Amino acid sequence: MTANQFRPLLGERGLQPAPRFLAAVPFRRAPSLFHLHYSDRFLTLVAGAGAGLAAAALAGLPEAGPAWLSLAVWLALWALYLSVVNVGQTFYGFGWETLLLEAGFLAIFLGPAATAPPTLVLWLYRWLLFRVEFGAGLIKLRGDRCWRDLSCLDYHHETQPLPGPLSWFFHHLPRPLHRAEVLANHAAQLVVPFGLFAPQPVAGIAALVIVVTQAWLLASGNFSWLNLITIVLAAAALDGGFLGAALPGSSAATLAAPAGWQQAAVLAVALLVAVLSVRPARNLLGRRQLMNASFDPLRLVNTYGAFGAITRVRREVVLEGTDDPAPGPATVWKEYQFKAKPGDPRRRPGQVAPYHLRLDWLLWFAAMSPPSAHPWMATLVTRLLEHDPATLKLLGRPTPFPDRPPALVRARLYRYRFTSPAERRQTGAWWSRDLVGDSLPPLRLDPVSGGPARRPGRPGTGRRR
């Protein structure tokens, strides 16, 4: 994912260049290997090293060595990804980035597969899962009124960032079922998490309820790896009997006790997490709860939450280009398609999670505010005008300009809504859309500055193909 997307988004010629960020932000605020050196080639090496270590860990290769080797591999994976996230700016500013980092840091101290996982680490995972669920529940209860009157899911399946293949069907469920969905969500996030700290079988039942809830969310939309990693975290609250039945051949009786040095390291980490948990816990109890915030530059203990506010109307930025250097009413504008975000109304929403399409997500935010709030949009237009291959790889296929760059690019704002069942049968379309207006006027490449420049005169309306 980093190898595929980082360079066009954050590389030397990216939409938010990491070298510029590194020059402005000191190491103590954003610890990263890239403070030592950044180049697109070095980024590729870091991404390749991470993928190689992850493949080795998945294959169990570190288990063939001494116990400290497993710890070293997971420590390296955490440090490499922290280096990426800490310079990722807007494009890595999602709650599941810090969730992966926090969970990955705790994984360092689980020990090799042949060793019983330390009980303290399992309790730290429960504390992490509690903050993920309870934080998400509180942010909703304190946020949009529709969470309190149970009407949020009348809109959310349609207006969420990246709807999935089943989102159209979820949206058209009867309203009483939408009310039931919200009530079940409140129960799963505000009540059930307390059961994680209870004796078995209560803790296991609480974990299974969370798993079922996350599976429902996984089916209803594309939320990157948030749902899957939450399901994995829930395993820390399941008892050995359940895990033994779910994973035949595994037995806690065959696992060795952790070494003394590992137990000492776990105790130190538990004390560190306890100290660093003070601010996230105060945030949970505070009236001005922050969502998806980190209180330390290493992102060891964080606060979580999502969708405290729900949009009622879906707007989408649609980028269009033309070969016509002097567009008028007869000009044909060709639309750029993206890999997941709504574009062509006849294209069914796709399943992309757990893969995270960062540009598609950020364009969902861009549609809700003026272009000045997202300076990277102008750079994106510049890269399209330059016909930049790395940027074009972030977009869907086929590209509307396969052989040469367009003369002009503009951004238009549309209101999208899911078609009704009757409209779907009649037209075959999943979406219906109406033009709201221009988000960016027609822009051409300025030969002097190298950036986008507004076309002289009033922009023509043109027609869209």
Image: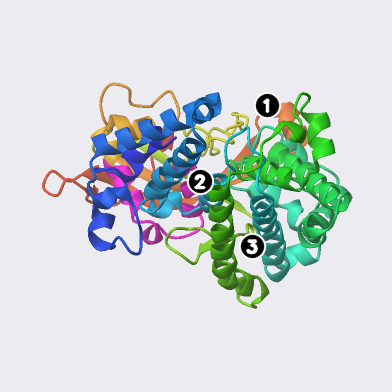
Q: Which comes sooner in the sequence, label 2 or label 1?
A: 2
- Mark number, residue 361: 2
Q: Is residue 361 magenta?
A: yes
- Secondary structure, mark 2, is helix
Q: Are marks 2 and 1 in contact (CB under 8 Å)?
A: no
Give the residue displayed 52% in from the left and 37% down from the top: 67
Secondary structure found at label 1: loop
The residue nearer to you, when weighing 258 against 312, is: 258
Q: Quadrant of the N terminus?
A: top left
Q: Quadrant of the C terminus?
A: top left
Q: Which numbered disc covers residue 126?
A: none
Q: Where does the image place residue 444, in percent across and percent down from the top left?
A: 24, 43
Residue at image location 29% in from the left, 42% down from the top: 11
Front residue (pair 382, 191): 191
Upstream in sequence: badge 1 or badge 3: 3
Compared with 23, 464 (above or below) is: above
Query: Which SS type dominates the magenta stretch?
Result: helix
Left or right of 227, for residue 37 = left
Disc 3 crowd, CA 10 A, few/some/many (<14, 14-19, 20+): some
Residue 93 position, x and y percent, is 46, 54
Which residue is under mark 3? 309
Amino acid under label 1? Answer: Gly
Q: Amino acid at mark 2?
A: Trp
Question: Which label belongs to residue 428?
Answer: 1
Whole-angstrom CA distance, mark 2 to mark 3, is 16 Å
Residue 450 higher or lower than 58, as above or below? below
Secondary structure under the numbered disc 3 in the rendered image: loop
Read off the magenta span. 358-382
Tag 3: amino acid: Ala
Mark 1 or 3, which is nearer the eye? 3
